[in-house]
Structures are given as structure tokens and as C-alpha cells.
Image (cartoon, rainbow, N blue to C red):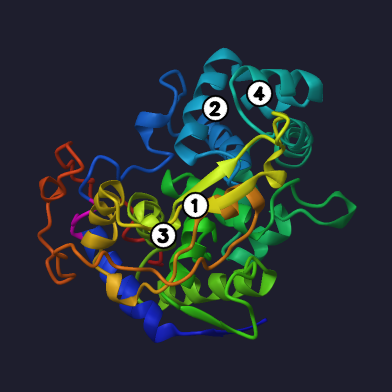
Amino acid sequence: MKLQVHRSRAETVLDELVLRYRTSQYPYNTRAAVLPQSQEHLPSSLPRGGLDEANFLWCLCYYMRGVIDSISAVTRLGRLYEAHPDLFVPQLAAQLSQETIRTRLIEHRLPDTKTIAKTWSLNAQRLTERWGGDPRQIFAGISDYEAACVRIQSGKKDTGFMGFQEKMVSMIIYFLSYRHMIEGFPFPIPVDFHVLRTTIAHEMVTFTGIAEDENLFKPALLVAARKLYLWYSQTHGVTPLELCDTIWIYSRIMCQYNPGNASTVIREDPEGNRLVARAREVNAIPVTWSTGQRNSYSRSCGHCAVRSTCSWNIPAGMYYVQGKLIRRGRRLDDPQIRLFEPADSNIRLRDVSVLAAEPTLLAPYPHPSLFES
């Protein structure tokens, strides 16, 4: 697979989205435009701004890998915290057996329990032994992403932390920077499904020598995406936190409702036995422009400010169930609907008949000085 990066296309798309984010235009002015780590999602008993919150955010990283919806993850993790706060103190968690941790995860409907229980236990030991049980201390004396990777990224000979590769290194930097718990420095945004969907759908990165439905989730794409978004962040005065929020919210609110991205998942075999995730079949829902599909289109592509550059359907089902990142054919526009022009920057939530709630403006972005020195 050969790929080519198109910076000018990235500028076209990201400039528009960042502008809309900064000026609280649709969809960033809706109640749905909330982040997983927003204070309203955290447990009320969790002390804010200190070690306890830092450790909670560290554990939240374990569920930022696509095994569960992000907001569901933080709310369930919050209930786990309220029931078992000792799990979030590395010195105490390190003394628990993996089976005990796993039982508690199961009780609170958190997935992938066997792997995460092992990760939780091992990382609690390493945090305790190496950093005094305080993830903020990992960043003492660090001023760049590469140095953070050396300390955090899992490697041979028990270096780093289990489950932490480039994306998770960016994730914990993002969380702790967002809450002003560490000094900010430039870093590539966490390259998750939403970032990859935006990158491919808008052809910021294009491919040659591949089949249309080939799995694109490969190291070369991840490297290219990290470099592209870091370049944009540094050259356009957009902090990585702001850029991450801009893309994540837009993809989650808008792109998931594109009818071409909709899927059905077969969860059982013909005998009625429940299939493990990777064995489940994911099928595209045919786009026939039914009333429901037109409503979905209206709340997504029909109100999209960057629709003109969006070329591909990128279904979430294939990624989250089978671990495949594919292009499911060209994105289509509803041939019988009156489209809002992308230049119309005054779209309000009430213009979308399928959504009933009134808009709630986001607070101004709180990290304007991340790159100032």
C-alpha cells in the first residue's frame, strides 16, 4: 500500500472545522457536543484537580481503545470508583489480584475484563515502583512527545506501561493537559477512529495499489496521520487539545449518522451461540433513501460544512467489531433533499427537525496558551 499526504486538503477541512468550533457554530453548539472527560461525567465523589483525578484519568485510558463508547466508559468507570475507590490508588490496586480486579470490572459492565485486569494490575505496580503512584510525575522534566514515549510506551524488558503505544501516550498527555495537571507541550493528537475517518473520508491521505474495501488500519497510515495533525497544529496555531476536540466531536455527532456508514452486526451463529466480537459479521445497510435515512442524512451530511470534500463512507461497525478500517464506497447525497449550503454558518439546532433539544453553547476553549513559552 502506498499513501500520499495532502496538506492543502487538510487545511481546507480543518480550517473550517476549527473556525466552527471556536465560534460555537453547529454542531458544536448542541448538547451532544460534550467530551468524555467533562466534569459532568466524572463521579461526584472524585476530588478534582489533584492526584485522585489524575489517577482516574490514567485508568480511563484503558477504555479509550474502542472496546466501549467513550462516554459510557467514563460513566461506568465513575460508578466503579464510587464502589471501589481503592482500585484507583496504584499502591492499593497493586496489592489486589487480577481476578479481584476483573470481578469488579465485570460487576460494573466494563468490557475486555481479562486483558484490562492484567493491564490495571501491572501498571499499578509500575506506577507505584517508578513514579510514586502519581502519573503526573512521569512528565517531570519532559518537554517533548518523544521523551514522553520513552517513559510511557510499552516496550521490551518491561519498559513503559502495558497497553500504552503512541495513541495512548497522546491520550494521557491530552487528559492531564486538559486539566492543567502538567505543563503543555506539542504532541500528536490521539489517532483514533474519528481522526482516521476524517482523514480518509476527506482524502487528506490517499492510497494507491489497494482494493476499495482493503483494511487501511496499518502502521504507515497511523504514522502519516500523527505527523499530519502535528504539522497542522504547530503551523496553524491550533493546540492539540483544541484540534482533538474539534475532530472527535464532529465525527461523533455528524459522521455516524451518514446513512452510508450504517451497519448491522450478526452477534449469534445459526445455532444461537453468541459470537466473540472479531467473529461477528458486519453488514452494510443498503441506502434506499427511506424516510429514516433521509432524516439521518439531514442531521449529518445535509448540514455538513465540509461536505464538498467528503468522498468516502467509513463505517464504525467494521472498525469496532472486526478491527478493520475500510472505505465502503463513495459517500452519496440524498437526491431529493434541499441541502443547506456549507457557507451557511448560522444553522441552529432547531433547523434540524429530527433533533428536539435546544442548543447549549460550549464554554470558550480553556487552553489558548499551550504553546506559549
- Residue at 44%, 70% (x, y): give it: 312
Report how far apart the C-alphas of labels 3 and 4 lie in the structure: 35 Å
Q: Which amino acid type is shown beneath numbered disc 3?
A: Gly
Residue drawn at x 29%, y 65% as measured from the top left? 18
Mark 1 neighbour density, 10 Å: few (under 14) some (14–19) many (20 or more): many
Q: Which badge, 3 or 4, is on the more N-terminal residue?
A: 4
Q: Identify the residue position indicated by label 4 in the image.
A: 105
Mark 2: which secondary structure? helix
Which kind of residue does numbered mark 1 sit on?
Tyr
Quadrant occupied by the N terminus:
bottom right
Marking on residue 77:
2
- Between 190 and 279, the residue placed more toward the observer is 279
Label 2: few (<14), some or many (≥20) within 10 Å? Answer: many
Q: CA distance from mark 4 to mark 2?
A: 9 Å
Q: Secondary structure at mark 4?
A: helix
Mark 2 or mark 1: whose residue is earlier in sequence: 2
- Visible residue check, residue 95: no
Q: Main secondary structure of the magenta part?
A: loop
The residue beneath circle 1 is 174
| Residue at x 59% of width, y 54% of height | 319
Residue segment shown in magenta: 23-28
